[in-house]
Image: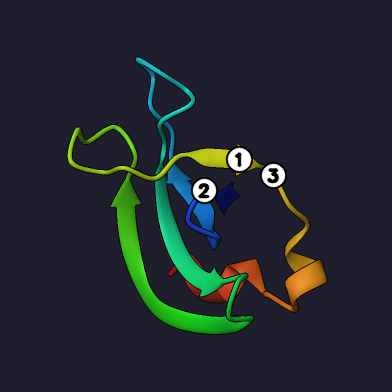
Amino acid sequence: MLLESGKLGVVTETNEADQRLPTLRVMYHTKFRTFIKVKTLDLARPIVQDRIVKAVDPRHYAIKVADFLS
């Protein structure tokens, strides 16, 4: 998923109350075209200001999703 911040993340947990606010593992920054330190981001938390812009193909960024799911 592409976020408003330009970061990319993989959905690791859905949110039954609001499917627009899943939990993601964020690992890449599109503006700087580089991998970043992996962190978990729960979009449902009020303190989190980022939002999903759209789904993207991880192959476009040479990301192997399986590497970030464990």
10 Å crowding of disc 3: few (<14), some (14-19), many (20+): few
37 and 64: which one is in front?
37
Disc 2 or 3, which lies upstream in sequence?
Answer: 2
Looking at the rendered image, the quarter that the C terminus falls into is: bottom left
Give the secondary structure at mark 2.
Answer: loop
Q: Quadrant of residue 14?
A: top left
Q: Which mark is residue 53?
A: 1
Q: Which residue is at a point 78% across and 57% down the rendered structure image? A: 57
53 sits to left or right of 11: right
Give the secondary structure at mark 3.
Answer: loop
* Residue lying furthest left: 47
Q: CA distance from mark 2 to mark 3?
A: 12 Å
* Residue lying furthest bottom: 34
**Residue 23: horizontal and vertical position, in percent?**
37, 44
Which residue position holds label 3?
A: 55
Q: Quadrant of residue 53?
A: top right
Disc 2 or 1, which lies upstream in sequence?
Answer: 2
**Residue 59: horizontal and vertical position, in percent?**
80, 69
10 sits to left or right of 43: right
Q: Are marks 2 and 3 in contact (CB under 8 Å)?
A: no
Residue type, mark 3 in image:
Ala
**Residue 64: horizontal and vertical position, in percent?**
67, 74
Which residue position holds label 2?
A: 4
Residue 28 to residue 24: above or below = below
Residue 30 to residue 3: above or below = below
10 Å crowding of disc 2: few (<14), some (14-19), many (20+): few
Q: Are marks 3 and 1 in contact (CB under 8 Å)?
A: no
